Amino acid sequence: MRLNLYKRAVLYALIATFIVLTINSGCLFGQARVTNFGVTTQGFPRRSNRQLPPGGNPSPAADPNNHGIVSNFFFSYCLIRVVDKWISIWKSNILSYNGSIHSEEYPHYRGCWIHCVSWDIASADLVNYLLITENIDTIMHFAAQTHVDNSFGNSFEFTKNNIYGTHVLLEACKVTGQIKRFIHVSTDEVYGETDEDAVVGNHEASQLLPTNPYSATKAGAEMLVMAYGRSYGLPVITTRGNNVYGPNQFPEKLIPKFILLAMRGKPLPIHGDGCNVRSYLYCEDVAEAFEVILHQGEVGHVYNIGTKKERRVIDVAKDICNLFNMDPDKSIQFVENRPFNDQRYFLDDQKLKNLGWSERTSWEEGLKMTMEWYINKPDWWGDVSGALLPHPRMLMMPCGIERHFDDVEKYDSGKSEFTDKSNPASKSNNSPQKPPYKFLIYGRTGWIGGLLGKLCEKQGIPYEYGKGRLEDRSKLLADILTVKPTHVFNAAGVTGRPNVDWCESHKPETIRTNVAGTLNLADVCREHSLLMMNFATGCIFEYDAAHPEGSGIGFKEEDKPNFAGSFYSKTKAMVEELLKEYDNVCTLRVRMPISSDLSNPRNFITKISRYDKVVNIPNSMTILDELLPISIEMAKRNLRGIWNFTNPGVVSHNEILEMYKKYIDPGFKWSNFTIEEQAKVIVAARSNNEMDASKLKNEFPELLPIKESLIKYVFEPNRKSPAA
């Protein structure tokens, strides 16, 4: 069911746009009368006419932003749904290098008062003036600097526009006291990089972990929006969306860039190996999503706008080649990767679907309509040759945008910085001698997987991260054939976000990765005579009569798991038992991992230092700073079988927090509660046990007891309190 958007007339603007801190001249579009609903707009192709619901009595609305793909489409989409209604809309337009004013974008301004004003979102006086004089009551805030590449070179501009500009707008809304709904448009990038093996996307309550200056400023703006909602009662709603594509998008973005290059017969440059995946939504579907959120969204809530359909960059390039009857093998060329290129952004969009929204446009249909638009309007953006470079460089100055495009002539002549396609991700190596080791690591975005990569770099060991998901056998085979590793490390798996309680309500997904996926990788490795170092868990045991708490009697490698309090632990015990049949697997039982990075939310010390109450039970634990290098040595020694991968001995929660208080924060306080009390606030029970690390200690006599390792590797390097 589609709702009438113009119960309250709203001005919309671009999701991915740029703001310039200057005030441009305003423009006013005149009055006419809407007589054709469902008309095909000149600027944007539509799939079909839409049934128009009954209209209401609209009131004015505004949106500070730039002309662009979603704003323009959404604006047109809204206008053609209005029949014989007089509406007053202020379209605030902040122009920058990727903005444009084309009155022909809106050929059906019939029956509407349309005001287009170019202004600076950071201009508090003008913002207040427009809100008051036009009696604005609804705002959709799309304005932002959005191009990630630019944020690395000019991050202060992103802070000024994305954070300060949002703050100015929020303050104006607070002061006027007339805003009935404020829609803040954010991005999926605020969640950070999604684990490549994740089977469920980030939901709206997931932690924000931005990885680049752009996403950090968007996350910061979200915090301001949330604060104004809580502190001043501003009726705010936040959206976080996947990649949007469609007509009129500035060609610095992937799809229009590839289309324009294909139209000119030029090669399509792909950063890195092209295996990064993205989720793409056609702009009309996004426009409909905002319509639903505007009328049905709950104030104070966040809504993901996404799709489960993911595509690799290289597959996008191939699809565009097919549209133009180009040979992908000849037309696609690989270039040096971006400074930081997140592998994946994956969203859980069920909350929005519950409101009645769904993706309507197929990838093939949307891509074809986009291509046709650019073919019909090849000069819409003027000279964009610089934006079509493999690595365009744009410097934003406070007084506007200054473009700096490197090597335009060289690229036009076909001589650019393309690397050999046969090995796009390779780095030059002057040594003719083949290195003795090369690791293939799964779990790139995970904590342990990331640390393994850093260790390999430090030790000079060649390595690559696997691209395939564990449950996809064909992709695993492709990884092995491409990388040609000597060893495979599996640090991928489902542990649950924010904790193992998640697994209780996502059992099929947990089984798919932790059991089926792990067995799949082990089997593929066995077929290719490869040793698989598998990071498992020791949370499959609990204290019992034969291993009582405080006795010093730990569980050994050959002991049968006795803890089934959580579904996560059940899957790990299940797969460990099955892996015994594979003689090419080395299973490392990790417990309550700790590292010297006390800012990492997955660090056990970080977790308990943030809890109001903790249980005080001695446990075996794993100090990653000491043990991860040992895992690499174990691979070199070709060790196999099951290993308790913990430091010898046990340490209690209170003992750790006492160290934290001594070394880090003398004023730190905490309180305890019992296991019974803990059980009332968690879904799944937790494992507590002591592991016998004598097998590992015999192999590596230098291995420190847990308390000594804590002091040496964690607390001394982070000491903030002066030594006594």
Image (spheres, rainbow, N blue to C red):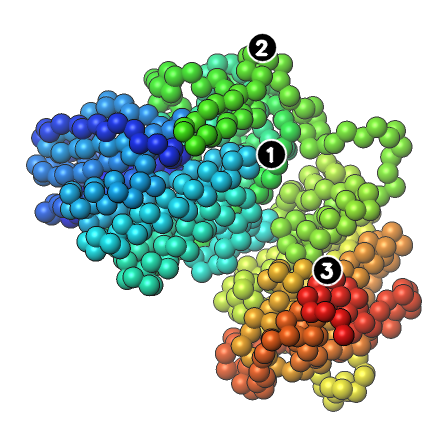
User: At label 3, which amino acid type do we have?
Assistant: Phe
Q: Is residue 104 left or right of residue 681?
A: left
Looking at marks 2 and 3 on the same chain, the residue that comes earlier in the sequence is marked by 2
Q: CA distance from mark 3 to mark 1?
A: 30 Å
Query: Residue at the spot x=58%, y=28% of the render?
Result: 270
Q: CA distance from mark 2 to mark 3?
A: 50 Å
Residue assigned mark 2: 413
Residue assigned mark 1: 338
Secondary element at tag 2? loop
Query: Residue at the spot x=84%, y=28% of the render?
Result: 430
User: At label 2, which amino acid type do we have?
Assistant: Ser
Q: Nearer the viewer, residue 315 or 19?
A: 19
Query: Residue at the spot x=50%, y=28% of the render?
Result: 395
Q: Nearer the viewer, residue 332 or 27?
A: 27
Which labelled disc corresponds to residue 535? 3
| Residue 514: percent from left, percent from top | 64, 60
In front: mark 3 or mark 1? 1
Q: Mark 2 and mark 1 in contact? Answer it, CB < 8 Å.
A: no
Choose top left, top right, bottom left or bottom right for residue 381: top left
Q: CA distance from mark 2 to mark 1?
A: 23 Å
Looking at marks 2 and 1 on the same chain, the residue that comes earlier in the sequence is marked by 1
Query: Residue at the spot x=88%, y=29% of the render?
Result: 432
Looking at marks 3 and 1 on the same chain, the residue that comes earlier in the sequence is marked by 1
| Residue 199: percent from left, percent from top | 54, 54
Choose top left, top right, bottom left or bottom right for residue 677: bottom right
Few, some or many residues within 10 Å of mark 1 (<14, 14–19, 20+) = some
